[in-house]
Image: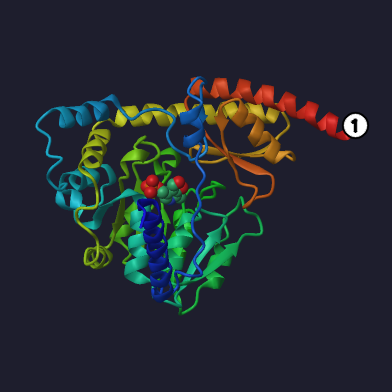
Amino acid sequence: MKLQTRLQTTERIESNKIDNHTDQIKLAYGIEQLEPYKPTSSIDIISQKTEMKHYKLDWNEATILPSPKVMKAISEYLNGINHLNWYPEILSHSLRKKLEKYTTVPSDNIIVTNGSDDALELINKVFVNPGDQVIVPIPTYTHFYVYAGQRNAEILKIESPDVFKTNLDGILSAITDKTKLIYIVNPNNPTGVMYNETQVREILEFAPQAIVIIDEAYYEFAGISMAHLVKEYKNIVVTRTFSKSFGLAAQRVGYLMASSFIVENCLKVFNPKSVNRVGQIAAEAALDDIEHLDAYVRSVTESKRMLKRYFLSKGLDFKITPANYVMVHHPMMPELVKLLEEEGVYVRDRSGQLANYMRMSVGTIEQTEEVISIFEKVLELLKIQERENLN
Ligand SMILES: Cc1ncc(COP(=O)(O)O)c(C=O)c1O
């Protein structure tokens, strides 16, 4: 047989083998009907259009690099006697000590995870059985559905009569004996809605059989936390991340805070080496430079004031959230997002969750001045488009 034909035959046999095998392999319970989480990020476009300036405002990340102390710690580690050949520090012991100081929650009640997504997955894995009810006020951070869906839970999506207000009654009236998990993002992504301590206590007390997750991914911007409730309630889990205000999204470091009961059970299945060493070093150094964090948060807060003034002056419908993003409403939503993108401003069209709304991360004052001037240009272009559509 000639080489060419032999190769073709082998390829055919290989592909048949794969087809046969996939026919025989049965998926785990619940996976088949799972909707994959399909994130779209502007990173691909940005890396291709290197000639222009970009504002990556689509994923609520920090718009500046982490503290110079972080950069120094990482480069000292990589350039010094690094131990990339060793596994990372087990259970992030020294980072947990620093987190104890930062959060005032004892280090034994903290688990450092591979991003806070990992913490969300862990809680689902440890507490949710097929058929259990998981309550999720919507719209919210949709990646969570993958973790609850993977456990084959029944996800009860609670819609609020006003999406920009809390819906305590909606949550309380959805709670049954089968409720195992309640997921509250505080402040919520994308609406910015926040439940206060009295409301959180009410939920915790109304559902003692359920774990209540308070996702504080945007805590540093909002400045309000429920972490102290971990000392009082057995059923609360507070999750946080280094991905947002600390500017370490690429390093994948997050953490959860919870009662000893929850932590001890989570540690039965948690992989103690799942947080990478460079991430651990970076997160520790970030906690050593709280001034950097505070300065960034102050700048974002001032930027939100600037945006509020600007949107008001344009007569736009918008929401300034307690987090590092704002929501903007416009009747020509896909066009607005597209025009901004052409000018190098990447935002997230949230029309799928909230009609005609987009979400935009907020950066420093200087960045916001530039973003506002691009916005101005784009709004003018939209007016022209609108007139053309009418003619
Ligand atoms: C509410 C919320 N929780 C969790 C995450 C994931 O954060 P991490 O990078 O820590 O996995 C995000 C990311 O956008 C988020 O918005």
- Pinpoint residue 375: horizontal percent, then vertical percent: 64, 26
Q: Which residue in the protein does label 1 denote?
A: 391
Up-down relation of residue 224 to residue 208 (above or below): above
- Pinpoint residue 167: horizontal percent, then vertical percent: 58, 60
Q: Is residue 151 visible?
A: no
- Pinpoint residue 385: horizontal percent, then vertical percent: 79, 30
Q: Does residue 148 appear left or right of residue 88 in this picture?
A: right
Label 1 SS? loop
**What residue is shown at x 63% (from left), y 51% (from top)?**
352
Up-down relation of residue 216 to residue 347 (above or below): below
Q: Does residue 196 appear left or right of residue 352 in this picture?
A: left
Q: Nearer the viewer, residue 261 or 226?
A: 261
**What residue is shown at x 37% (from left), y 66% (from top)?**
124
Q: Does residue 192 appear left or right of residue 251 in this picture?
A: right
**What residue is shown at x 31% (from left), y 54% (from top)?**
256
Q: Nearer the viewer, residue 205 or 307?
A: 307
Up-down relation of residue 215 to residue 211 (above or below): above
Q: Nearer the viewer, residue 112 or 17?
A: 17
Q: Residue furthest front?
A: 1
Work out which quarter of the rendered image holds the C terminus and state it: top right
